[in-house]
Structure formats: structure tokens, C-alpha cells
Image (spheres, helix red, strand yellow):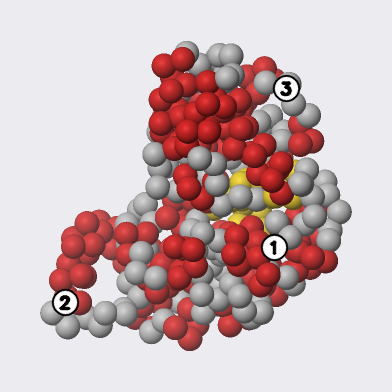
Amino acid sequence: MQSPHMMHELPHLAETRTLHQTKDELNAPFFIIGSGRSGTTLLRLMISGHPKIEIPPETWFILPLVRAFPILTRLTNEEASKVIEMMTTDYRWPDMGIPADSFRNQVMRLTHPTLRDIIDLVYDYHLETSGKLKIGDKTPPYIEIVPELSALYPGAKFIHLVRDGRDVAMSFIDIKMHGNCRVYERNFEWTRALRFRETYRTTCFEPQIIDIKYEDLIRDPETTLRKICTFLNVEFESSMLSVSSRIDRVPERERIIHPKLGEPLSLTSVAKWKVGLSKYECFIMEACLQRHLQRWGYALRYSSSTWKTILTITGWLLFSLGPILARGIPILQRRKILRESIYI
């Protein structure tokens, strides 16, 4: 969750957005945000099928940059050098397709650049190489820095993709990203993302955000994509409905965690928890996630009034024991007391 200091800065960032109006706001980037394993890669490939829209691989570097450097004022030469180093030494930088030395030279040719000027070099490169007109950025954790991105790009829009938290947790476990899937920890990635989303409800950033459900994208992709296109002020294109020809746009090292991207959309990816979770596993997940599941319209298996109090008490106990469970469950799995594939 955002620190009290950051929360205090939200109004300030909103006020200063007007200071950086030099580019046409209609061409400001948009951002696909939310939790990992929510379908953001699928949505990226769909939208990038639009003849006018380019979405490069996840950038990630903006997250640490806006926390370490001034957002709107010009950078000193020393700060600009540190920005370059932070960007080009990240293991994901090769995904950008820009040689580090070439990028450094481009930045050094700028006169007292702002943070946005440097980031724009990456976005402009992808627009030029793709021959497209509008840039998007699919980096889910950017849900944490909507105010900062809005200050950098006053016309920015945000597509918040949300999926049933039980399916998200199962997906994390299936690809063995156990650090992201512990529903009994208060910083479980899915609940953390939704807490940030709720933070923006009563701020000036709310009109810039559209909420899209993964389940709607799978059940009715054309209607959902048309809704997104309207939000982005572009015409819907039928080419967005096919993703199989764009799998090579996913970095090779990540394709192993997206094994179904080359397959036709299937309803089997919706509400997988109904067949994949045991009653015990489902009870644990719903005890921890019930508030957010219900707020976002996801029905509970344990939904009767009798279960509500039991779920609430159990959730409190699980959150209290979170650090112990995080250490203990792997031990129990190694000793074969719990099965390796258990969904908790």
C-alpha cells in the first residue's frame, strides 16, 4: 500500500500535471495495470494487434525511477547518468531492443532532460520501428504509481485488468511463483493491486482509469475490446481478436509461463478454481480474499450468512500467522505432509 507520505503527495501531483503539457495529450501513452497472472499479457497482444497501437515488452524501470528522481524538473548530468544506469542494467533492458551504449549517447545529446524526455526515447523508438502512432505500456505493477505517471503524462489513461483472485493465486502456484501467491499474506499481489485501485476512487485520477474483467475479455472479447477502444479514442479493429501470430512479441524467457497464449480463447480459463480447488483450499482462499472478491462481483463458494463470520475469523487468524505459514508450508511439502501442488 502507498505510504502516508505518498498519499499526501497525490493532490500535489494532480496540481502539477498541467506543467508538462508540451505533447499532444491525445497521444500520451496508456498503461495496462493490475496484478500479475490476470491476463495482462493476453490483453497486450490483443491491443497491439491494432494497426495504430504499439505495446513493447514490460518496461518496469519507471517504477524505481519516479521514486528516486524528480518527476517534473530537469535532471542534472549526474542524475541523468544514474537514470541511464538504472534503466540499462536491469535484466529486462535487452527486451527493449536498444543497445545500452546507443541509448546513453541519445540521452547525453539531450540538454538538461526531464525524466519524461529520457523515457520518451524508449517509447519513440518502438513507435518508429513499428511504424505505429500510439504507444501503450503493459507493466502491471505500475498500478502503484498512477499519480506519478499522470504527472509525467497528463493525458495518460489506465486499463486496470482484474481477474478472480482464486484463479490468480492458482496461476501463480502453477508456475511456481510462490512468493507472489500467498493469499494469507496481506501483500498478496492481487489484493495489493486492488488496494491501490481503491485508493484512486475518490481522486482526480478516477476518470483516467477503466476497469476490465478478464472473464469478460474471455467470454466476449470483441465487446470488451470495443469498450477499451472507445476509452482510448481509437476505432476497433478485428485484427485485435487474434493473438497467435504475435506470440513472438513475448520475451522468450517468459513464454514458458504463458503456455496457452498460442491457443484459442477458452472458457476453461474462467473460474478454474471451481474444479481445481479442494473444499479446504477454497475455504482458505475465500477466508483471505472474501472482501475483495465480493467487492468485484465474484461469488463465493462459502457465501451463506453462517459462513461469513467463520470466514472473517479464519482470515484474521491466517493473516496473523502469515509469516509462520510462509516458512512452514514448504517444510511440510518437503516432508510429504502436504502435497507439492497444494493451492495455499
Q: Which amino acid does label 2 sit on?
A: Arg
Q: Are marks 3 and 1 in contact (CB under 8 Å)?
A: no
- Residue 288 higher or lower than 233, as above or below: below
- At a point 31% along the width and 78% down the height, the residue shown is 342
Q: Of helix, strand and loop, which one carries label 1?
A: helix
The residue beneath circle 2 is 334
Q: Of helix, strand and loop, which one carries label 3?
A: loop
Q: What residue type is labelled 1?
A: Met
Q: Earlier in the sequence, mark 3 or mark 1?
A: 3
Q: Is there any visible trace of residue 106 in the rendered image?
A: yes
Q: Which amino acid does label 3 sit on?
A: Gln
Q: Of helix, strand and loop, which one carries label 2?
A: helix
- At a point 37% along the width and 59% down the height, the residue shown is 180
Q: Which of marks 1 and 2 is nearer the N terminus?
A: 1
Instruction: Indicate the position of residue 279 as horizontal and vertical percent values.
Output: 38, 83
Instruction: Indicate the position of residue 54 as horizontal and vertical percent values.
Output: 70, 50
The residue beneath circle 1 is 46
Q: Is residue 90 left or right of residue 111?
A: left
Q: Which mark is residue 21?
A: 3
- The 10 Å Cα crowd at callout 3, few under 14, some 14 to 19, many 20 or more, is few
Q: Residue 338 carries which label?
A: none
Front-lying residue, 245 or 167: 245
Instruction: Indicate the position of residue 272 as horizontal and vertical percent values.
Output: 51, 79
Instruction: Tell me the mark number nearer the camera, choosing from 1 and 2.
Output: 1
